[in-house]
Every structure is written in structure tokens, then in C-alpha cells.
Image (cartoon, rainbow, N blue to C red):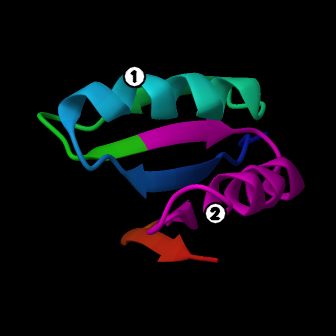
């Protein structure tokens, strides 16, 4: 059985902001949250699409550019 993961991605305005975003994603239920490469994207991995959508709604109250996407065979798809 393949376990589907959902990713919430947001943009950190400054590197220091990334730590706060990672903490927010984890508090929102992400299994893990990391800075993508050297930034500025921060992403959280969720096991449940509803949890990811809820996290997105929470983050959009304070941040711009928050997206939910799922992996596909050819990359990813925004939800």
C-alpha cells in the first residue's frame, strides 16, 4: 500500500523567518518540516489532505504564498 503524502509549501521572506515557519508547520500537524535547499521555500509533509488544508488556512492568516500540493508521477500538483 502506498501512503500518500501532502505537502504544504510557503515562502520565508528572510532566512530567520524559516525557523518560525518550520515551527508553525509542525504545530499545525506536519510530520516533518524543512527549509528547501538554501531557501526561501519551507515545506511541511502531512499524511492527511484535510490536515494539510487546515494548516494552509491557518498559515494564510499570517503569511502569503501558501500552497498545498501532492506528488504525481511527473512531479507535483497544486490542490
Q: Nearer the viewer, residue 5 or 78?
A: 78
The answer to which image quadrant residue 27 occupies is top right
In three-dimensional space, the C-alpha distance between marks 2 and 1, rounded to whole angstroms, equals 17 Å
x then y, percent, for residue 67: 54, 67
The answer to whether the residue labelled 2 contacts the one labelled 1, judged by CB atoms less than 8 Å apart, is: no
- Tell me the quadrant of the picture where the C terminus can be found: bottom right
Question: Which residue is drawn at the image coordinates 11% and 34% (left, top)?
Answer: 38
Task: Return the residue at label 2.
Answer: 60
Horizontally, is 17 left or right of 68 in the view? left
- Tell me the quadrant of the picture where the N terminus can be found: top right
Badge 1 crowding class, 10 Å Cα cut-off, few under 14, some 14 to 19, many 20 or more, is: some
Badge 2 crowding class, 10 Å Cα cut-off, few under 14, some 14 to 19, many 20 or more, is: some
Whether 28 is drawn above or below 50: the answer is above
Whether 51 is drawn above or below 30: the answer is below
Q: Residue furthest right?
A: 50
x then y, percent, for residue 12: 32, 46
Q: Is residue 13 magenta?
A: no
How many numbered marks have been drawn onto this rendered protein structure? 2
Q: Identify the mark at residue 34; answer none if there is no mark.
A: none
x then y, percent, for residue 37: 16, 35
Q: Residue furthest front?
A: 62
The answer to which image quadrant residue 31 occupies is top right
- Label 2: state its secondary structure: helix
Q: Is residue 47 magenta?
A: yes
Horizontally, is 19 left or right of 4 in the view? left
- Of labels 2 and 1, earlier in sequence is 1
Whether 74 is drawn above or below 31: the answer is below
Question: Which residue is drawn at the image coordinates 75% and 53% (left, top)?
Answer: 58
x then y, percent, for residue 7: 57, 50
Question: Which residue is drawn at the image coordinates 21% and 40% (left, top)?
Answer: 14
What segment is highlighted magenta in the picture? 43-72
Task: Return the residue at label 1.
Answer: 19
Amino acid at each position: 500500500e502506498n501512503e500518500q503524502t501532502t505537502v504544504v509549501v510557503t515562502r520565508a521572506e528572510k532566512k530567520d523567518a524559516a525557523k518560525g515557519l518550520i515551527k508553525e508547520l509542525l504545530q499545525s500537524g506536519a510530520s516533518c518540516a524543512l527549509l528547501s535547499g538554501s531557501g526561501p521555500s519551507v515545506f511541511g509533509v502531512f499524511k492527511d489532505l484535510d490536515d494539510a488544508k487546515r494548516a494552509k488556512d491557518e498559515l494564510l492568516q499570517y503569511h502569503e504564498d501558501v500552497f498545498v500540493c501532492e506528488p504525481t508521477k511527473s512531479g507535483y500538483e497544486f490542490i
